[in-house]
């Protein structure tokens, strides 16, 4: 089963793009991966996976990294 999902980021797109450029785009088991597409006002992370478990794993990895970014941003603003 081929599955896809998109995460659209509309804030801090330049900083978030830098985070994901350094990360692996395709995982070692070749079951899932993602690509970045940046436009003027948004960053789209398009996830592709061969099965639901691989899709969940990639989405979890992405949201964990976004959560760390969000937490760090709050600390810096204080």
Image (cartoon, helix red, strand yellow):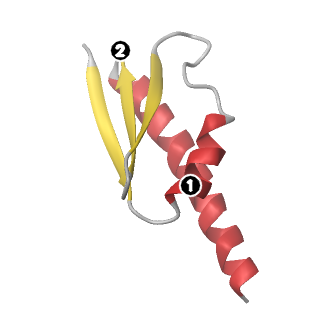
Taking the view exactly as shown, the residue that stands out farthest to the bottom is: 78
- What residue does disc 2 label? 50
Snapshot quadrant of residue 49 = top left
Does residue 53 appear to the left or right of 63 in the view shown?
Answer: left
x and y, in percent, of residue 65 in the image: 61, 50
Does residue 20 appear to the left or right of 10 in the view shown?
Answer: right
Of the numbered discs 2 and 1, the one sitting upstream in the chain is: 1
Nearer to me, 43 or 5: 43
* Disc 1 residue crowd, few under 14, some 14–19, many 20+, Cα 10 Å: few
x and y, in percent, of residue 9 in the image: 40, 56
x and y, in percent, of residue 59 in the image: 45, 40
State the SS at label 2.
loop
- Rendered view: 1 above or below 74: above
- Rendered view: 1 above or below 57: above
x and y, in percent, of residue 28 in the image: 62, 13
Quarter of the image where the N terminus is located:
top left
Snapshot quadrant of residue 35 = top left
Kindly check if marks 2 and 1 are in contact, taking CB atoms under 8 A apart as contact.
no
Q: CA distance from mark 2 to mark 1?
A: 29 Å
Nearer to me, 61 or 53: 61
State the SS at label 1.
helix
- What residue does disc 1 label? 14
Residue found 73% across the figure and 79% down from its top: 75
């Amino acid at each position: 089963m081929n599955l896809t999902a998109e995460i659209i980021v509309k804030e801090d797109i330049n900083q978030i793009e830098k985070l994901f450029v350094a990360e692996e785009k395709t995982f070692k088991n070749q079951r899932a991966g993602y690509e970045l597409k940046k436009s003027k006002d948004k960053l789209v992370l398009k996830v592709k996976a061969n099965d639901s478990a691989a899709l969940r794993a990639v989405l979890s990895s992405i949201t964990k990294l976004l959560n760390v970014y969000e937490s760090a941003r709050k600390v810096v603003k204080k």
